[in-house]
Amino acid sequence: MESFKVLVVGDLCSIRYDFLPSLLQLSSTNKMEYFLTDLSNPETPLSSLFQNYAFILFFVDMQNERTWRICRKGIAETTISYALLKSCLVVKDLDNSTRHAFSGKDVADTAAAKHIQLVSFSNRNPIEESNAVQAIYRLFTNASSLSMSSLPVGNDVLPFVL
């Protein structure tokens, strides 16, 4: 069976610390490959980068403004038809944005404009204890029926393979 390639977009440090361990647990029984990017390579057109993956997860930590800038840039380049079927915006601490120039409403409105599913968790309700991982897994399952054949991986991503 072909692997299911997932691109995780956001601040690499935040992804590795707050989100990747839970994703790896989710994937322990599935053939999934995760690739991380902060979209820092200006030579790679985002639309072509996104087409190389079966699913895109945008990860925003509401206490890290850089994660929002990265994801907002990626979401802006995502077509609605692609976003609707093959992407998800995962937000940590959606209701905790008092320190930054962006708010939970900004995040939710941006996701809604592209019809991107929004999944959230918080420090009070960690991702392992919330329904976020299960919701993401359901989205993966739905998208896997649309999965693509093996495609090349962009040069600005870091692979994490189980």
Image: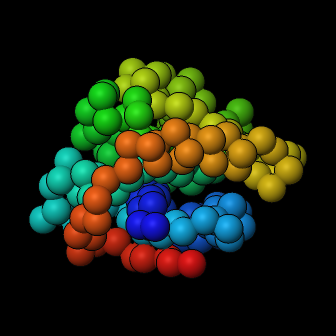
Q: How many discs appear?
A: 0
Q: Nearer the viewer, residue 124 or 136?
A: 136
The location of residue 102, given as percent across then percent down, is 51, 35
Question: Which residue is at a point 50% across and 77% down the rendered structure image?
Answer: 160
Q: Nearer the viewer, residue 28 or 62?
A: 28
| Quadrant of the drawing holding the C terminus | bottom right
Left or right for 44, reference 140: left
Left or right for 108, reference 44: right
Residue 77 can be seen, yes or no = yes
Question: Which residue is at a point 76% across and 52% down the rendered structure image?
Answer: 127
The location of residue 67, given as percent across then percent down, is 49, 53
Q: Nearer the viewer, residue 131 or 123?
A: 131
Figure check: 118 above or below 66: above
Left or right for 58, reference 78: right
Q: Nearer the viewer, residue 155 or 152?
A: 152
Residue 97 can be seen, yes or no = no
User: In which quarter of the view is residue 26 placed?
Assistant: bottom right
Which color scheme is applied?
A: rainbow
The location of residue 17, given as percent across then percent down, is 65, 70
User: In which quarter of the view is residue 31 placed?
Assistant: bottom right
Question: Which residue is at a point 40% across and 76% down the rendered structure image?
Answer: 158
Question: Which residue is at a point 68% across and 70% down the rendered structure image?
Answer: 28
Residue furthest to the front: 1
Figure check: 44 above or below 82: below
Left or right for 133, reference 102: right
The location of residue 1, given as percent across then percent down, is 46, 67
